[in-house]
Image (spheres, rainbow, N blue to C red):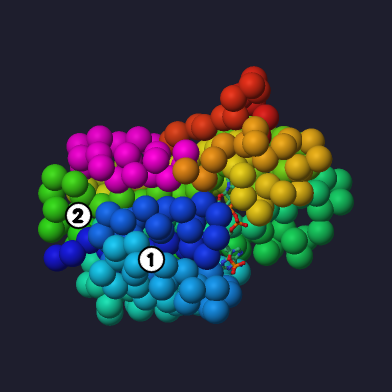
Amino acid sequence: MSRSALVTGASKGIGLGIATRLATLGYGLTITARDSEKLEVVAEGLRSAGSPDVAVVAGDMADEEFATELVAAHGDRFGSMRALILNAGVGTSGSVADYPMRRFDKTVAVNLRTPFALLQASLPLLRTAAGADRDGGAKVIALSSLTGVYSESGLAVYGATKAALISIVEALNAEESGNGVCATAIAPGYVDTDMAAWIHDQITPDTMIKVDDIVELVDGLLRLSARAVVPKVVMTRAGTDGYRA
Ligand code: NAP
């Protein structure tokens, strides 16, 4: 059975970086985001980078039903899933005092509800991959955030969704790691992508974590044997006290 991965938010930023590395490692890939045209261009690049097969499934992570469709497409194509990369997310800000509930619902749907539904739907495929490779197992990587570990003013809801991801990852490890499905939540400070552009006037891109730093970490985590569990990795920006993104 060849190795395959499903990467959400693969059209740019961290997700694109991870998908590209997985392609060079020879993974079959299902990639997703909303913009299907952009995904088709990315898919071509991933094939050139070494992926034997790339499936494009465009959709909105705000729609929980999409999780079922996405995993079904991956299962039909690849039959198992060695890695699930829960990367897509929306960065929203607003104070507790006046955060609009519509924005709350959207942030929770994209960052937490659909990723959970995706994880749930993917478990049979992850277990199949873990059963076929007892040494390496299967892996789940979730992009959390430093704000999910240390709260920040203006990021209550975003941070809450990211904290919840860490909690789900830990519970998943308790339930599934004995059978080879291990998960890690990565909690970085600001990473130099479009998502962090809004704060360039205060934090310049050249002081942000590089996408490649996250990619190296993911690569290393995927190489670990099924005997080792790394529940959470906190990655902070050099030159900070490590408590602020
Ligand atoms: P990015 O450059 O903005 O990329 C986000 C990706 O997610 C894109 O592929 C985007 O594609 C997709 N996406 C966004 N909303 C979506 C939706 N509703 N449905 C489906 N796909 C959607 O962001 P990034 O910086 O790479 O962030 C990746 C992850 O890292 C996120 O979970 C983020 O919270 C986390 N993170 C980022 C930072 C940072 O400073 N950049 C720090 C800590 C954690 P479409 O727009 O085409 O849908």
- The quadrant in which residue 237 appears is top right
Q: Which residue lies most toward the right here?
A: 98
* Residue 49 visible in rendering: yes
- Circle 2 residues within 10 Å: few <14, some 14–19, many ≥20: many
Q: Which residue lies most toward the front here?
A: 48
Tell me, for residue 150, which label it has, or none.
none
Residue 199 lies in the magenta stretch: no
Element carrying mark 1: helix
* Percent position of residue 112, x then y: 55, 56
Bounds of the magenta segment: 213-231
* Percent position of residue 144, x then y: 53, 45
* Residue 122 visible in rendering: no
Report which residue position mark 2 lands on: 130
Q: Is residue 63 left or right of residue 98?
A: left
* Percent position of residue 43, x then y: 42, 71
Q: Residue at x 67, y 40 (%)?
A: 205
- Circle 1 residues within 10 Å: few <14, some 14–19, many ≥20: many
Quadrant assignment for ligand 1: bottom right
Report which residue position mark 1 lands on: 46
Distance of mark 2 from mark 1, alpha carbons?
24 Å
Q: Amino acid at mark 2?
A: Ala
Mark 2 or 1, closer to the camera: 1
Ligand 1 under 8 Å from disc 1 Cβ: no
Q: Is residue 75 left or right of residue 10?
A: left
Q: Amino acid at mark 1?
A: Leu
